[in-house]
Amino acid sequence: MKFKILHLFPDLLDQYFDSGNILCMRKRLEWRGIDCEVVAVRRDDPIADLSDVDVILIGGGGDNEQLYVC
């Protein structure tokens, strides 16, 4: 079993170290013997196929960054 996490716009929306949530999830999955793959989608990257994604993480950001990703 492989658990897949999609991290949207970590280059723009990580104001509150939301990537720390991914570190925590990865460690908890590791403790349970579950493989984990993290896919980061940065600005101007095409968004990958979401059909095999288990969790989507979108962090917090400033007003300008939030407007940009909308």
Image (cartoon, rainbow, N blue to C red):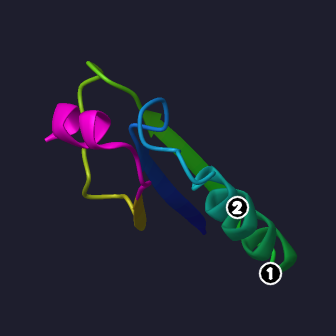
**Residue 58 falls left or right of residue 40:** left
Question: Is residue 40 left or right of 19 when viewed as pictured?
Answer: left
Looking at the rendering, in which quadrant would you find the N terminus?
A: bottom right
- Image coords of residue 67 (percent x, y): 17, 38
Q: Quadrant of residue 70?
A: top left
Residue 32 disc label: 1
Give the residues drawn in magenta, as a range. Answer: 58-70
Q: Are marks 2 and 1 in contact (CB under 8 Å)?
A: no
Between marks 2 and 1, how big is the CA–CA gap?
9 Å
Give the residue type that dot 2 points to: Asp
Q: Residue shown at 63%/64% (left/top)?
A: 21
What x and y, as percent, mark residue 59?
44, 54
**Crowdedness near tag 1: few (<14), some (14–19) or many (≥20) residues, C-alpha within 10 Å:** few
Instruction: Report the amino acid beneath label 1.
Output: Arg
From the viewer's side, name the closer residue of 44 and 11: 11
Residue at 48 percent of width and 29 percent of height: 11
Q: Is residue 61 magenta?
A: yes
- Checking the image for residue 35, the label placed there is 2
